[in-house]
Amino acid sequence: MKSKNASPAQLSQSSDQWFLSLRELPLDQNGKITALAMLLILDLSRTGITPGYYEIMPDPEFVRQQLWKTMIQPELGDQVPQRPKEILLSKPELLKALAPSLRNIQVAAQLGSPPPMVDALIAELGETLDNLPQELPGLLSVPGTNPRMIASLFDSAADFYRAMPWRRLIDYQTLSVAIDPPGQQLYVQVMGNGGIESGLTFYTSWEDVLRVFKNANSPMELLPESGIHGLTFEPRDDLPSEDQSGMRKYGWKTAGRKACPLPITFTKEGEAERPTRQHLLFFEALMRGLPEFITHHLVQDEQGNIKPVETIIETHHFDGSARLTVRYPAGELPDLGEDAFWFDEDEETLELPETLVEANQLAEQAWEEDEVDDRLRLAHKALEISPDCTEAYLILAYETESLEEAQEWLEKAVQAGERTIGQNFIEEKKGSLWYWREARPYLRARDGMAENLEALGREEEALAQYTALLSLNEEDHQGARYQALRLLLQLKRDMDAKVLIEKYEEDGSAVWAYSSALLTFRQRGEQASSRQALKKAIRINPYVPAYLIGAKPLPAEEPKRSVLAMTAKPSNML
């Protein structure tokens, strides 16, 4: 990369066209009218926006410096330092001020207008930014916490994630847990068996548990009076910016970049808050104690149902020791019906060779080890027992520092998975392969290979893997559609993106809504349907526009591409 003092004239020149806009965005903050000065530098060839916002209007020299910086140090990860062929400017005064400097570096300049979506985005933002929800505060904002306490919480979360207790419990199977001290009764559900969201949720009354199984016109109606208290594992960049800063400053540990704990309480009104200090201690005690109960005390009968059990687990949290009195089941749940959940306790399974079962058990043990050397040792030992142990290859891929070496291990993992379940079986069960537990390591290997291929810059191959996963697992328990849609839009394969959006049209996520809006603007330009799509996206998640145009700063640390980045995390391993 060129140094900050390099001149754009020294850079290679592309055939790209850029657009530069400098405008005011009026804001009404509690009746006080203010304005932000917004500078947008848009690469029209890649639809990449470099935004900035300022409390006072920048002068032309500042704008020129920012434009030079964008050429020399592009912020988008897939761009290289370069000069565009031409820059369109939104105002005559900008053209007059910047044209001489642009001529000196052989860049053409003229007046121009932005793509319709830019104006529409800013117009809609002006209507929503006044009441923009605040970002979730960091855990250190919770009264009574300190960096050491949060470090202890993160440590317990890393151990909980590695233990993978969701392999043995379905999301709705509820545990009764009494924590002493302080003698608090909780009802806990472990999330992760479905393959997408992992973590745990607790309620403070049995009535609250039963409430979520009722029918309602809106999910908001199901929120209990005392709220829902949950901790999920998320990518590092999805954490509040204050928590990301805390991880860098204090060295809080996680089980991986995509396994960072995010504890949240959802109130009766649907507002997201940080848990109280006492609830954070509850989370820590639960994550330290429940894996032992789930692993060593839950036993199945001959029909595959978990036997009732109650026991005491001695554990601890930051403030000291804690005793968990854990009982399963916590109570009688309503009749869910045969089709209420995807799983069937009597589902047919594949019979695996004894050597592979033994190897899988070693690999399972390896995933639970804290030390890398121990994980590697057990993975290699598993492969000595059975070269078809997909999980062992995934461990080796996950632990390597080399993307190229990871790719080799991942290819072996996929091949091992294909040998284990057979090409004929894969074709026969195509579309519903996830429901066969023996096939899940194979599916996760393909998912990991897709992510690694993209990290290697082989985007078309990565897209092919995500597309294949959607054909093998149509209900998309792995969330492959989000990665496929992103790549389709990035590669300008708009028709394929449209087909994918329509296939999962019931997806209510912000990713789907904003991608749909982008695609509508690309295909139709600015019209009523396009603006309506954007309004819908902003209603779903009003935070996004502020980041797109720079009204909110992105995390200070740019996301790093890591080998697998926990995509190949174990789940429901045999």
Image: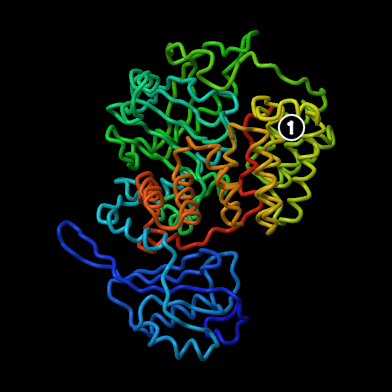
In which image quadrant can residue 11 be found? Answer: bottom right
> Residue shown at 69%/40% (left/top)?
468
Q: Position of residue 202 (x, y in %)?
A: 40, 28
Instruction: Please state, as top left, top right, bottom left or bottom right, where the C terminus lies in the image.
Output: top right
* Direction left: furthest residue: 31
Instruction: Please state, as top left, top right, bottom left or bottom right, where the N terminus lies in the image.
Output: bottom right
- According to the image, label 1 marks what residue? 362
**Is residue 183 visible to us here?**
no
> Residue shown at 46%/20% (left/top)?
174
Q: How is the protein colored in the picture?
A: rainbow
For residue 229, above or below residue 482: above
For residue 191, above or below residue 80: above
Q: Position of residue 256 (x, y in %)?
A: 58, 47
**Is residue 455 visible to us here?**
yes
- Amino acid type at mark 1: Leu
Which residue is more in the foreground, 193 or 474? Answer: 474
Which residue is more in the foreground, 554 or 485? Answer: 485
> Residue shown at 56%/29% (left/top)?
194
For residue 173, above or below residue 407: above
Q: Secondary structure at mark 1?
A: helix
For residue 120, above or below residue 329: below
> Residue shown at 61%/53% (left/top)?
493
Which residue is more in the foreground, 148 or 393? Answer: 393
Question: Would you call the spot at circle 1 few (<14 residues within 10 Å), some (14-19), or many (20 or more)?
Answer: many
Q: Position of residue 501 (x, y in %)?
A: 53, 42
Count of marks placed on residues? 1
Which residue is more in the foreground, 443 or 273? Answer: 443
Q: Position of residue 181 (x, y in %)?
A: 36, 28
Q: Is residue 505 left or right of residue 380?
A: left
